[in-house]
Amino acid sequence: MEKINELKNMIEAMAKDCEKFYSKGQNSAGTRLRKSLNELRKKAQEARNEIQSIRTSRKAEKTGTSS
């Protein structure tokens, strides 16, 4: 859950730059927004890997205990 909360916080932090870029036409806000989106992508991939790892270990536990 910690990773999901990090993603939520990152998205909330990007809201100001998003508004500045789309509403006010500030190109520098677009640069910051692209950088933030790239970091968001990396964090999301970390969360996916963690989830997959937990799923795999749970499957292994079930298989190991039923043998």
Image (spheres, rainbow, N blue to C red):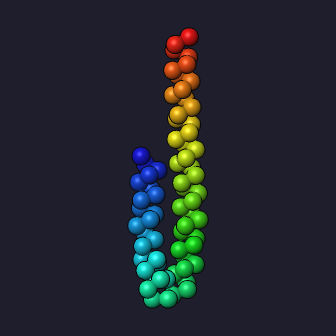
Foreground residue among 5 and 67: 67
Q: Is residue 42 above or below residue 50?
A: below
Between residues 67 and 43, which one lies in front from this camera angle? 67
Q: Residue at x 52, y 35 (%)?
A: 54
Residue 10 coordinates in the image, percent (x, y): 46, 63
Q: Quadrant of the C terminus?
A: top right
Q: Is residue 49 above or below residue 35?
A: above
Q: Quadrant of residue 19?
A: bottom left
The answer to which image quadrant residue 60 occupies is top right
Q: Which percent across, then down, holds residue 27?
A: 55, 86
**Residue 2: x and y, percent?**
43, 48
Q: How many marks?
A: 0
Judge whether 46 appears above or below 58 on screen. below
Residue 63 lies in quadrant: top right
Where is residue 35? Give x, y as percent: 58, 71
Identify the residue at horizontal 58%, vertical 44% (top origin). 49
Q: Residue at x 52, y 81 (%)?
A: 29
Kindly identify the residue that appears in the image at 54 percent across and 80 percent down: 30
54 lies above or below 49: above
